[in-house]
Image (cartoon, grey):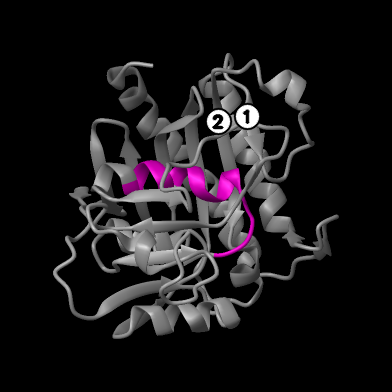
Amino acid sequence: METKEIIKLLAPVSRIAEQATVAILDIYHDAYSIVKKADYSPVTDADLASHDIIKAGLAALTPELPVISEEDTVIPFEERKKWSTYWLVDPLDGTREYINKTDEFVINIALIDHHVPILGVIYVPVTGVVYYAIQNYGAFKKYRAEEPERIRTKSWQGGKVVLAASIRSSDQRYQKLKQCLGDYKILIRGASLKSCLVAEGSADLYVRYGETSEWDTAAAQVIIDEAGGALMGWDGLPLKYNCTPSLLNDSFIVVGDKSHDWLSLIPEDSLCGVAK
C-alpha cells in the first residue's frame, strides 16, 4: 500500500479506538466478569466489547481486509497465509493491569502488509494518549485535542541504562539481565506502554523473555521503527507476521539506539559475557 492510502486510514482507525475506549471505561468503573481462556490468560467483558467494536469498525472501513483479533476464533493458517494485507488487533492489551486497576492497559491496532506492520495505533484509554506511526511517515504521540508531537528514540551516550519493564519482570533471567547492565534505572509500565517509553526516548531498552502473541507487538513495532529504534528477535532481525501456523513470538528486545550493540550485552539467558 502507498503511504497516502495508509494516511487516510489513520483518523478513522483512531476514532474506532476511541469508540472502543468508551466501552472499556464504562466496564472498568463497574462490575464485570472474568473468565480464563484455554491458555489460562484472563479475559473480561471489556476485552470482548472492545473486540466487537473494533472488528465491526474495521470491517466497515476496509471490508476487503480480513482481521485477526486476540478475542476472535482461530483462523486456519491455510486460509490466512494467502493474505497479503490484514488488520492485527489486541482489543485490550494488559488485561491483568485492567483487572488490577493500574490504568496501564491499551488498545493495539496494526495494519500488516506482506508480513510487516505499516500502520500502528496504540490508544491508552485512561489518559486519552495515542501513539501512532505510519511506515516512512514518522511516529507521533497525541493527547486528546492537542496537536500531535513527533517522537524519537534517544541515542545511547553511555552511563545509566533506563530499562522499561513490567511489574512482573522479577524472575532469574531479569536478575541476571540487571547484573549485565550494571548501572541501570527501571521504569515500570504495563502492556505496550513499555515499548512506547523507548519510542518516545524515555527508556533505552525493553527486554521481553518468553512468548508473546503477534497482536502484542505489531503496532509497537512500527512505532518503534519510525521513531528510530528497533524491535527485534535474538537474531537481530525485525519480527515478521503471519509467517507460520503459530501466531506466537519468541523472546525479543526493543532498543532506542539501534546503532549500539545491545545484543552483545544481553545474551538470551542473560548471563554476562555469554555470546549468542
Q: Does the magenta stretch include residue 193?
A: no
Q: Is residue 214 magenta?
A: yes
- Give amino acid for label 2: Trp
Residue depicted at 38% across the width and 41% down the height:
222
Spot occupied by residue 2 in the image (x, y as percentages of width and height): 32, 16
Q: Of the residues under marks 1 and 2, which one precedes in the sequence?
A: 1
Query: Does residue 259 appear to the left or right of 57 in the view shown?
Result: left
Q: Do the residues labelled 1 and 2 touch (CB within 8 Å)?
A: yes
- Residue farthest left in this picture: 157
Q: On residue 229, which mark appears?
A: none
Q: On residue 67, which mark appears?
A: 1
Which residue is more in the foreground, 83 or 176? Answer: 176
> Which quadrant would residue 251 be assigned to in this image?
bottom right
In this view of the protein, can residue 128 be seen by the observer?
no
Spot occupied by residue 71 in the image (x, y as percentages of width and height): 72, 45
Spot occupied by residue 133 in the image (x, y as percentages of width and height): 32, 40
> In this rendering, is residue 91 above or below 194?
above
Question: Start and end of the magenta stretch?
Answer: 209-224
